[in-house]
Amino acid sequence: MSGVSRQQYATYTKLIRVMCSGTVDLAFVLRAFAKGSDGVFIGGCHLNDCHYNTHGNYHAVNMVSLCKKLMEHLGLNPERLRLESVSAGEGIRFAEIMNDFGKQVKELGPLGQSEGIDKNVLKLKLKAITQLTPYIRVVLNERLNVRFNSIEGYNQFYSSGEFRRLFQELIEDKFAVSQIMLLLREKPLSTGEISEILGLAPTEIARYLNGSANYGLVRYEENQKCFALVD
Amino acid sequence: MEKEQERFGGQLVKSSGDTHFGDVMVVGGGISGIQAALDLATSGFRVYLVDKAPAIGGHMAQLDKTFPTNDCSMCIESPKFIECKRHPNIEVMTYTEVDRVKGEAGDFKVTLRKKPTYVDESKCTGCSACVEYCPVKYPDQFNQEISENKAIHIYFDQAIPLVAYVDESCRYLKEKTCTICQGVCKNDAIDFDQRAEEVEVNVGTIILSPGYEPFDPELRTEYRYGEFKNVVTSMDYERLLSSTGPYQGEILRASDKKHPHKIAWIQCVGSRQVLPGGNSYCSGVCCTYAQKQVILTKDHDSEAECTIFHNDIRSYGKDFERFYQRTEKLPGVQFIRSYVSIVKEDPETKNVTIRYSTADDGVKEEVFDMVVLSVGLNPPANVKGLAEIFGIELNSHDFCNVNPFNPMATTRPGIFVSGAFQGPTDIPESVFSASGAGSQAGEFLDYRRGNLAQERTYPSEKDVAAEEPKVGVIVCHCGANIGRVVDVPSVVKYCLTLPNVIYAHEQLFACSTNSAQEITDIVKEKGLNRVVVAACTPRTHEPLFRDTLREAGINQYYYEMANIREHCSWVHSKEKEEATQKAKEIIRMSVARVRGLEPLKEFDLPVNKTALVVGGGLAGMTSALSIANQGHQVHLVEKASELGGMARRIHSTLEGLDIQGFLHDVIGKVYRHPLIRIYHDATIMDVTGYVGNFTSKVEYQGRVTEIKHGAAVIAIGSQVSQPTEYLYGEDERVMTHLELDEKIAQGDEGVTNSESLVMIQCVGCRNADRNYCSRICCSESIKNAIKLKELNPQMDIYILFRDIRTYGFKENYYREAASKEIRFIRYVEDDKPQVEAVKEGGKSVLRVTVTDPILGKKLEIDADAIALAAAVIPSSDSQEISRLFKVSLSPDGFFQEAHVKLRPVDFTAEGIFLCGTAHYPKFISETISQAYGAAGRVLTILANETVVASGSVCEVKEDDCLSCGACIVACTYGAIEFRETPRGRKAVVNPVLCKGDGLCNTKCPTRAISLKHYTFKQVLNQIDAAFPEEEMLQLDKVVANV
């Protein structure tokens, strides 16, 4: 509709067609960021105006809410991801949102750089979280399977203590371990080195490493004073 | 006609010998004719679709948006053009008129006269080079003569056929000079030797869908149309709003090409007027289209001030009331109930002064930048000639004379009518009356169904799955739509650098018939196995290009559309370089996608040729009869012990027709029909299956019967609400309008001998709880009032109303009622009438207190009886039926059709259809029309042996399935279930139930389930290609940085 009514918007957007906003996988969003996208927009039907009868748009709200929290955790500005309900008839609105979001992303600047994260560290983090996506899907299905009637409901839940607790319990540790494993895959590193790269306290790192060692995933190399992956 | 022949050179060429044979001729290619043609062609008949204009589309093609959803009119209509053009059973004949009709039903011999276009349709590519060079400018008919076009031009951008034609302003035709166009045409398509051609076609039936003609306000000089430059008609305004209009979507004044900021709409121009040149009827569409225009005006310019001068606001259709409220709430929008006169034009500014009066301020004058005349609908042009040619009768308004119990039948057997020629109607009614006329033509011709119809045949498909991808990219200029912004040649060059692209080429209009053929040829010649067309939107054009691949023997799912128009040139029209760059990127993404696409099989599902009709009222019975008359078994399920539904309680129509007699007749036909099986006192327990193959369980006579059917019609009707106010239920003199109707029919003297009777309108609707208009109550009350006046002329009758909504020809009865001294008193929602039972002079009366809006004071009316126009509400069974059939309800609780405008009797769930008041309150004529419409739609399925299901459905990789069931929970279609396999319990998709939304994909922890054509990998390919080059994660750097 935006096109048909010749609503002008900025040229740096590229559109990918999916059949339902609910089918946008967390991995798609992460991939776009990993590939250098500074912002990701997901457009879907208005709530309760599903073109199928699956109400996948509610699922999209849930996924995006979680993804924003993951981004925060990664040190990325969650405003780089935006979900909006835009019906096929709302061409003008679509163009307005594109312009507004474009402006916002421009102000935020290049991904990572503006947030003060080293490019390669960011890639590492994105890779680490991407590796967790099958697990996160299960978390979404089983533990974060929430349904609210409005966006506000989702916002409330995702800023609640309950969610915070779940996030810590279910994701934070897994994410840290995933990063450590990726790093160790390159070469053995000491607790201090890992701590510096990931910006986590050495005691935390030690805890993760000990845990992983217990599972037989890493071992301590006495001679090098560092940890390495178990082959 | 003779004069025209002279102009075209005085010669008439007989078509080359052989007579053409068809089943049905549809005369008029507007949306109604298109729908009739498509339905019939799909249900096995050969159809000739004839239009006198150079392209099909009718008036709908000229509209900018459609109410109440503000869908883009052309965008929703143009795919239908293409469908008509590509349908193997439709012969589209434009610029063609019917000259004479001989014969009779079953064997009509129609002589057509094809006007010369001076362009060889088979050679013209629609490139419009000729248009560019043509020196003659001529007012553009399609743009309401606001802007100019050339003597040779294409009627509009999406025209079917998309070919140029020469109109009478051509210099060569007048003076035998010029022929520049012949010089520039590379295809040698221009042929000034063309002559009018006579074509004879034999058909069994004819459907007339000639549409309407907008009222011409020049007939009444007081509107100053044509005199004051900034007075326009609503049709002119549609073109001004349209992005393909005279100013590319800018609303400009004719006088100074400036944006008007203060705009007035004058309603009822040419309607509801008993004046010479005016029409006494209500045109039914103007209130809502004016509201639409106001909303769109505010979209264009949020500061615009819009004033609508109106009489009653007739928001009687589905969702119209909300649309009206939405308009009214916009800032700077005013609705003023007043007659107006256009006083003067400022000689300097060309602003227009309007005089009007309000109850509060008296007579006022106000200046507007622009005035829009909301013109009504007139019968089609030259309607008398039309009636004569077809031998049909017209009514007193010169619309088609139809039988209210069968509004699709003309006075001549075998000739049917659909659309606005029946009387003023909006788009959805034009569409379902078309399906209805189609169904009746089908009843007539059932014996020969399939005899002339052809199936499209395609060459057998090559297996290229093992081949390396060989991608061809076609970049379309879309005339100037893309080419003006995007540097197409440089894009083509770029395409050749992309991996696996072995061919890239540009086309002016990739969608023209020639270009499509060219693509097919290239695919064969170059051995391409994948194609990207970089052009416009897949919404309208994907089916066409997929077809070109099929023609070349390549699986159609190896096709991908890169939208460089809607997503690029149209939205970045001022940034040519950036747009060109973006076009390249879009194509790069599409190429990345197409490389990873897989061939998919669409599968044919057998169709069970039986229908299930739910509801044995007039709607259900009419539908059942029409389906059964076309040779299909029908199971008619009724929850009550007798057939007839609500119609059993209504005795006559406003027009005075005897409903009981008619109903009796229909019930008799249903009982006698050998193919209809009736289930009384029956309840539907369960529905499973999908289009072509449903199984419903019906509880009937104490046991559960299983019915297998290919399609279903939901016709469960509606109910009358029980009022909770005005002493209803407390005082027996207070009744509903339906109860009054019954009492009149019974000759209840308590009612007919009343000295005074008050009717109160809008009881239980048009309020916060039921925010809709029940549509029929104004006419129902007026009918009762007129009847009572006939029985007892002394009776004082008062109708307390908010807006009188007697749309269409019913307006005449409103006028009749007013002339019979039935008093109409307007009230507003915040100041409703009060009713109390009091004793007056020893007599017990019902005292009604209401504010008289003219005098501004309270009136007290002592009535002997009160009739309440109680709201029509959804049937109490709708929730259950909606759940069983998995079809949705609208916010008001009526059933929700698939598309308000173009699929008014379809549900989104395929194979299930809708008619009658289950859809929305409506009159018996409308119900019958819609019931035939639903039958026509049912036949598009039942007349075929198979239905085709999309190949883009989900599939489970069994090895990866953990049988967690997350996908099963997500799928509300119930398309996934567990099945025991040798390797344990696994999720399995039933592809015929899968709708291809893919929600389940995001639930699966192992990605075992994936939506074909949108697999995880395919989407990632596209995401990756969105960015110039992959930056590898350099972990060693991370480590080194430490």
Image (tube, coloured by chain):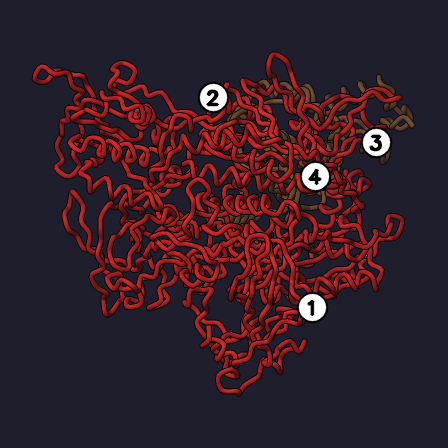
Q: Colour of chain A?
A: brown
Q: Tag 4: Cα neighbours inside 10 Å, few (<14), some, or many (≥20)?
A: some
Q: Tag 3: Cα neighbours inside 10 Å, few (<14), some, or many (≥20)?
A: many
> Mark 4–mark 2 contact, CB under 8 Å?
no
For marks 3 and 1, give the one nearer the viewer: 1
Q: Is residue B55 above or below residue B423?
A: below
For marks 2 and 1, give the one nearer the viewer: 2
Same subunit under labels 4 and 1? no
Q: CA distance from mark 2 to mark 1?
A: 63 Å
Residue beneath disc 1 = B489
Same subunit under labels 3 and 2? no
**Number of callouts:** 4
Residue beneath disc 4 = A28
Q: CA distance from mark 4 to mark 3?
A: 26 Å
> Mark 3–mark 2 contact, CB under 8 Å?
no
Residue beneath disc 3 = A184
Q: Quadrant of the C terminus of chain B?
A: top right
Q: Where residue B432 sits: x, y (%)?
A: 51, 43
Q: CA distance from mark 4 to mark 1?
A: 33 Å
Kind of element beneath mark 4:
helix
Can the viewer see residue B448 in this picture? yes
For marks 3 and 2, give the one nearer the viewer: 2
Badge 4: chain ID: A
In the image: residue B233, left or right of residue B43: left
Q: CA distance from mark 3 to mark 2?
A: 66 Å
Please, what is the three-letter code of the amino acid marked with disc 3? Leu
Q: CA distance from mark 4 to mark 2?
A: 45 Å
Q: Colour of chain B?
A: red
First in sequence: mark 2 or mark 1?
1
Badge 1: chain ID: B
Same subunit under labels 2 and 1? yes
Please, what is the three-letter code of the amino acid marked with disc 2? Ser
